[in-house]
Image (cartoon, helix red, strand yellow):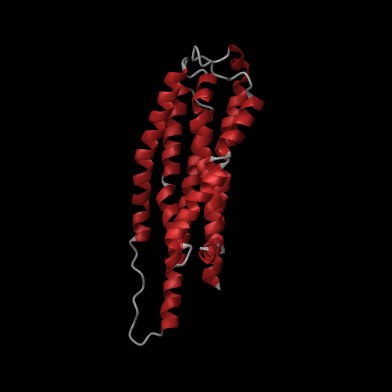
Amino acid sequence: MYEEARIVLSSPVFILLVAGYSAYCAVIIGLMTFGSAIMLGLGFFEKQTAASVTLGAVASLAGVLGTPLGGVFLGPITKREAPTRVEGESDASHTAKLELFKNNQLSAILSQNALQSLAGMLLLLWGISMDKWGFLMLLCVGLSTIFCTQSGVNISSMLAVPEENRSFAIAVLTLLIHLFGDVPSPIIVGYLKDKFAPHCTVSSLIETIDPECEKERGGLRLLMSLVSMWLVVMIGGFFAGVCVCVFLLCM
């Protein structure tokens, strides 16, 4: 197990994938945990129940649309056939051709995921300045775009390691994205919310927001901006992975 972990964690592309996907998890969990309070504080809803149900519906719709759509976008890349061995070709030559094919495929997937992450972040940032329905629409489209990356991340994490270590790599990826993503995210986002909008707390008895929260709407928009910009780590991780793949192709 130690040797397998060493092999998986020695892949720079895999480490960059972990960093990027951890940011993805952090943003999603942060938005889902505090999104209803943010929408209440911005005056989009009057009751927490309505805000929570709407947020859940938007996120569910985004997942239903974005996840399969990501697989569709990957189709042209993953359908490329690996090079076959030609007569008289040596094992070393054929192995080099397969490695070249794998790196080309990996860089293409990471490039696509980086662009999808960038588009999702820009849509979320745009939605912050909109009214209720504009915010919800751009939140849905932005989350759908981000959810498109899931298939690509899973495939990339397997391509980034030797074939015999792929199942272990998925397990390590799952462990690390929880450790660095959705576990610390609510703590960090909650701290920032208390700092920028301390009065925007929902009363559990009457499900309404403190009236003083209206004065702190600028802080809520800043909070939403910072959470959305966490995706810069995701974008940077994927683009850095592309650079590593290109470097390996040039060697």
Observer able to see residue 238: no
Q: Nearer the viewer, residue 207 or 27?
A: 207
**Residue 226: quarter of image:** top right
- Residue at horizontal 48%, vertical 50%? 174
Residue 190 left/right relative to 87: right
**Residue 190: quarter of image:** top right
As drawn, 28 above or below 21: above
As drawn, 251 above or below 54: below
**Residue 156: quarter of image:** bottom left
As drawn, 214 above or below 182: above
Q: Quadrant location of the C terminus?
A: bottom right
Residue 96, given in percent of the width and then of the height, sits at: 45, 76
Residue 195, given in percent of the width and then of the height, sits at: 66, 27
Residue at the front extreme of this rendering: 1
- Residue at horizontal 62%, vertical 13%? 212
Q: Nearer the viewer, residue 29 or 20?
A: 29
